[in-house]
Amino acid sequence: MTVALADNVDQRFAASLANLESGEPPRRRQAIAFLEKLGGLRAFQVASALVGDSDPIVAAAARRICAESSKKGLILRNNLQAQPLAQKILIKDFYQLLDEVVFVIRRNLNRVVMDSFLFSIPKFALVTLIFLCPYFEVLKEVFAQGWIIFPAIFVYEAFWRPLIWSSTGAAVLEGFPENVLRRQSMKMSGVRFYRKILFLDLVESLLYAVVLTCVYAWYLNYFSSLWPAAIFFLFWAMIWVDSSCSTVARILISDSEARILWRSGYIGNFTLAIKLGMVLALLYLMIVGSSVSLLWIFGFDALLNGPILFLFGFVIAADALLDPFVMGYRILLTRLSLDPGCL
Amino acid sequence: MPQELVIHTPENAEIRVPLAGMFSRASAFVYDIGIQLAILFVEHLVFITCLSSYRIGPGIALDSGFVKGLYLIIVFLTVFGYHPLYELFRNGQTPGKRSHGLRVVALNGQKLSFFSSILRNFLLIADFLPFLFLAAVFSTLTTERHQRLGDLFAGTVVVRTEE
């Protein structure tokens, strides 16, 4: 099946080349539209010759193809001699490192946003249900039952998170300018990959689920304080800072036999972890504060006087929005620490 | 892997300058806020602590409307004049930006004009909305040259300097 599909694309590519040479505007426009949809190096090569085309529609589409390809790091060999190479910079401080995460995500922004939205639907559904609590007694009852919420947290963290890696994680990897990493992103799917991530991330996921459970148990008055949550959070953070990065490393390396050698001091760097924690706290505050402000501005301030459960709703929504950023940070940090020979 | 501002010169040469990301900019901004707070604190000390025991001139006491007005004007200039002052006379670099290797330039790579600088800094108020600069973050993430709202209106961009 795969071969037939590849043949078909090749044939259509050849046909579109013939159409472009035909001189008939409708055929040429159809052909360039196909190339735009196709993307990749072949489309880039053809489009680069058409940016100055006499037909404005063809020229505009060609420019779009070139811009999109350049964003993904593609450089034509004939342009390579005339233009400077993509600039490489030394990452001098932590904030520049975070900037690079944003740059990577921006290179494939549409897919990252789309995937993270799709795979955050359970979170957004949960947030909606939380905000509907004051209007439906049944929902209020459901959220007061620990035996429903606790297993749901465990199932989400243990079994849903690996799916997020194979979607949003792959989308973030596609934003890297290095071909070797982009190729690796194509392997991030299928049952084998899911099972691999499931087992690699299991300890971290379960600990995180325990932290969330402890917080919710405190809300339901099962615990009198947040100390159990704080202690488990500490354990989870230690695992997250150190060993979880090796999970990402196993995603990045194409050769399963390769040994992972940490090349730089990024991995397990305590100061970096503390700084990231502070930045994330600020970002959460920004999103939660903005949501509250918007509700207030648009006259929904009655909602702000709701139960403390609403605070969970805001934090979960912020969590869904920040997930791709944290994923990108982990991938970039691991990439910078890996021996290039492993890739 | 920086994203770049591409400037075409009249000689048809291409200059590529790496753009600054939002986290470096935010960090530089916090640095500048720290300096502004320190300046405001000193001003406050000067006006309240030192001058409280003096009469400034015949008929002008510290609690008079004139002195209070003067104090408010100085506070206003410190808050809103700090960034334009440095951007116009220190080559687009406030102390925070200099410490992070950043510079504000016009879209064509030239030095900022007075109007651009005033506009981009007054629009910080819009960038702050709805809370803690969410509008600025959203704008920086989605625009091609990582511009916040003030930059978009003033036609400016923040770039990374090489030194």
Image (tube, coloured by chain):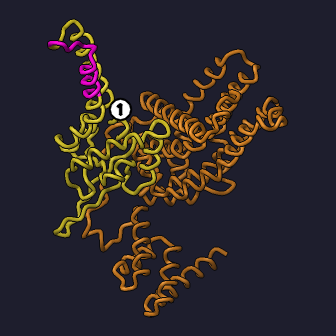
Chain colours: A orange, B yellow
**Could you say where residue B104 lies in the image, as x and y percent from the top left?**
26, 47
Please name the residue shown 41% across and 57% down the image: A177
**Could you say where residue B14 lies in the image, as x and y percent from the top left?**
23, 64
Give the residue type at disc 1.
Val
**Mark 1 crowd level (few <14, some 14–19, many ≥20, 10 Å Cα):** few
Q: Is residue B160 visible?
A: yes
Q: Quadrant of the N terminus of chain A?
A: bottom right
Please name the residue shown 67% across and 43% down the image: A123
Which residues fall within the magenta stretch? B58-75
Please name the residue shown 28% across and 38% down the image: B100
Quarter-of-image position of residue A307: top right
Q: Is residue B35 visible?
A: no
**Could you say where residue A169 lies in the image, as x and y percent from the top left?**
56, 50
Does A58 sit left or right of A160 as displayed? left
Quarter-of-image position of residue A95: top left
Out of A275 and A219, give the one closest to the viewer.
A219
Q: In the rendered image of this protein, does residue A312 appear above or below residue A221? A: below
Badge count: 1
Does B139 sit left or right of A122 as displayed? left
Q: Is residue B67 magenta?
A: yes
